[in-house]
């Protein structure tokens, strides 16, 4: 049977036989399903952000404003992060992480197509 290519680009290759993601190779026959997950809001960081922002608005408290900016960046990076998860008989494997949701979703769709074609 000839190998069909579903997606190729950068460090990603999805064919009817294999999935190559960022230097790791997975056999399509071993993958039962694929999904994209995203973490929830990191509430402790959000509380630190709000508290330090309020404190940073007071005169002479520039350190609190810096903490607010750092915790805000951390919150954004966690909320925007998507994880591509491959599910097999051995459990779940986070195969790829990215903040580019459209890219992760296109990889998920190609893997789902490869799984359904076997």
Image (cartoon, rainbow, N blue to C red):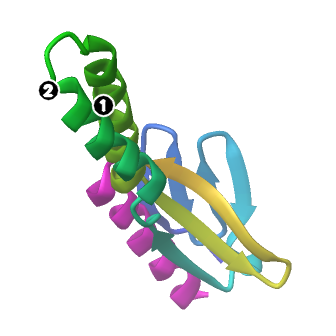
Q: Which mark is residue 68?
A: 1
Residue 85, quarter of picture: bottom right
Q: Which residues are magenta?
A: 99-118
- Queried whether the magenta region covers residue 46, the answer comes back as no
Query: Which residue lies at the image location 20% right of the left edge and 37% below the top edge?
Result: 54
Q: Main secondary structure of the magenta part?
A: helix
| Label 1 Cα crowd, 10 Å radius (few <14 / some 14-19 / many 20+) | many
The image shows residue 28 at horizontal and vertical percentages of: 68, 73
Query: Which residue lies at the image location 31% right of the left edge and 19% below the top edge?
Result: 66
Q: Which mark is residue 31?
A: none
The total of numbered circles placed on residues is: 2
Disc 2: which residue: 57
Query: Which residue lies at the image location 70% right of the left edge and 47% below the top edge?
Result: 24
Above or below 23: residue 90: below
The image shows residue 50 at horizontal and vertical percentages of: 27, 45
At mark 1, the secondary structure is helix
Left or right, residue 34 beside residue 53: right
Left or right, residue 17 beside residue 37: right
Above or below 75: residue 52: above
Figure quadrant of the N terminus: bottom right
In front of the other: 95 or 48: 48
């Amino acid at each position: 049977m000839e190998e069909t290519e579903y997606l190729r680009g950068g460090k990603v290759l999805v064919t009817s036989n294999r999935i190559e993601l960022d230097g790791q190779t997975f056999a399509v026959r071993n993958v039962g399903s694929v999904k994209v997950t995203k973490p929830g809001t990191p509430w402790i960081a959000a509380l630190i952000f709000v508290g330090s922002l309020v404190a940073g608005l007071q005169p002479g408290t520039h350190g609190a404003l810096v903490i607010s900016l750092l915790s805000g960046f951390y919150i954004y990076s966690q909320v925007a992060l998507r994880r591509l998860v491959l599910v097999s008989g051995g459990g779940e494997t986070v195969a790829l992480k990215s903040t580019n949701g459209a890219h992760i979703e296109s990889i998920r769709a190609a893997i789902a197509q490869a799984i359904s074609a076997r």
